[in-house]
Amino acid sequence: MEDPYAWMENLEDERVIRLVEEENRRFREFIGELSDELFPEVWEYYSMPALYGAKLTEKGIIAMYKERDRQLIRWLGGDLIVDSKALEEELNDEVLLQGFTADGKGRFLAYSFSIGGADEGITRIIDLETRRLIDEMKPSVWNVTFLKDGYYFSRFYRHGETPDGVKAPAVRLFWKDGSGEKMVFGEGLGSGYFIGLRKSTDGKWAMVTVTFGWNRAEVYVGPIEEPGMWKKAYSAEVPAEPIDVIDGKLYVLTKEGKGLGKVITVEDGEVTEIIPEGEFPLEWAVIVDGKILAGRLVHASHRLEVYSFDGEKLDEVTFDLPGSVYPLDTDGKRALLRYESFTVPYRLYGFDGKLNLIEGQEVEGDFRVEEDFAVSKDGTRVHYFLVKGTRDEKKAWVFGYGGFNIALTPRFFPQAIPFIKRGGTFAMANLRGGSEYGEEWHRVGMRENKQNVFDDFVAVLDKLKGEGYRVAAWGRSNGGLLVSATLVQRPDVMDAALIGYPVIDMLRFHRLYIGSVWVPEYGNPDDPKDREFLLKYSPYHNVKKQKYPPTLLYTGLHDDRVHPAHALKFFARMKEVSKDVYLRVETKSGHMGASPETRAKELTDLLAFVIKAV
């Protein structure tokens, strides 16, 4: 199939560079000074402290934050360990901290960062006492797991091939100590497979999960120090993850059955069900002080449940606002949990049999969170959240995703607060393709069923339109696919479209950057059967002459996960038929984000566009 804009896949092409400069200028002319006026307000909320992660050690808790214009890793209530601003001075470029871990004794810290928000970056390991740099690995690795004389890590090959000769993209697990590094797991695994290693809370066992895409899992278990002894203990044609090994029993959270999640134990190949499936999905579980602490998703917000080892429900904890609650760490005696909601950047809780608030941040003001349902084309009820202030100007900004088994649960959007204060309503839709209602909900929104996701989004937007709202539809990444597909199919259900870092060319996604790892979710464009359903909805191939609302495509040149060409090519095709399409290209931003100020400016531009367009 002829592609008139194939040249845009070369980001070094002078025509691409010229286009980016011209269109960035044109977008700035469209929003005028509005963005500059709004920035202080967005920055006020964006710069509120936000917690990204926390780790328990014998010497205290280490936590990672975003604070104003920097990201920090520090001892909770104590000394600073890593400062992104210091890294920027050292490297003379914008830096994004991606994550960290530490050993249980509090001796070593591993942290990863990238330049300009790229996925690919650098991992450093430091001695926490002397702050001496012990190791630096490029490109970045993850899943660093410390033992007393070395550490394991996962390396994702984006280029070339693995040590065992498999072409990238592919993942391998390594061991590293004073004598060097060696590959210990993953031989022969091809593209689409991911490997994760976790240590049991007693420190004796390795739990290795091999997943294929977002759909299938195998769990290997063995003595942590002897990779050659790791044996497959459990496998499922659905998502599954190990929880812990207690008294020789492997505890697993599996989506087998109806896909709603249950806890089982595996011992000598024998499977015993501990917590059966319920009406709503069990999303995660950890073991704390001889009990199972689990997070259940009820209409896309979490509640906590506590169970005994024989599956008896002992307690249930709900929160004052619909929110997201995930475990950050557990040492078997205590767990750290992170809570977030639409007006709560974070709360850090400890759990040791009861829940206690350690610290948190909250937005002052009069807000309310409502919930409602729309009915999709095939009769499926689609849940969505509405966040409102004291007045309602009948303008809605609707966020959606619908894919990769990811649930959209309440979270803090700094740019939504000024919108709500101006009488806007911020909405978030829980579409098929995510995990909001279990694995079946995911499956009916992937591959040949992807159209269900767009129909769900249409139902939510259409209902709001019917209630008198002017509607801005927004999605990012796979959510960018959602909004662009909905836009070309039903432009009448939205008054503005915001499409960020999107996947749009569904016949070429697998040939751009690491796109081939999404084949399990989307299908394979090289397979004639898959190509047929992909072509049917591929936004890039379905642009036609019709009236489109004002549309903003935005991306970042450092996005090494979703190629910027998706946004560029779709923009070019849209511009053939619409004068109201705009392009914003961030030169210092990747898929993971960017430095705080760069990211806050991007969010402010989105807000300015929504205010201008609706």
Image (spheres, rainbow, N blue to C red):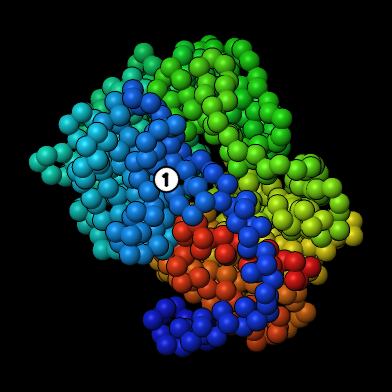
Whether residue 312 appears in this view of the structure is yes
Hey, which quadrant is residue 330 in on the image?
top left
- The residue under label 1 is which amino acid type? Leu
Marks counted in the figure total: 1
- Seen from the viewer's position, the closer of residues 352 and 456 is 352
Where residue 307 appears, as percent x and y from the top left, is: 57, 16
- Seen from the viewer's position, the closer of residues 614 and 405 is 614
Hey, which quadrant is residue 541 in on the image?
bottom right
Q: Residue at x 65, y 81 (%)?
A: 29
- Bin the neighbour count of mark 1 within 10 Å (Cα to Cα): few under 14, some 14-19, many 20 and up: some
Question: In the picture shown, does residue 106 fall above or below 308?
Answer: below
Q: Which residue is mark 1?
A: 72
Question: Is residue 594 shown left or right of residue 169?
Answer: right
Q: Residue at x 23, y 50 (%)?
A: 136
- Seen from the viewer's position, the closer of residues 199 and 514 is 199
Where residue 143 appears, as percent x and y from the top left, is: 34, 41
Question: In the picture shown, does residue 436 fall above or below 94?
Answer: above
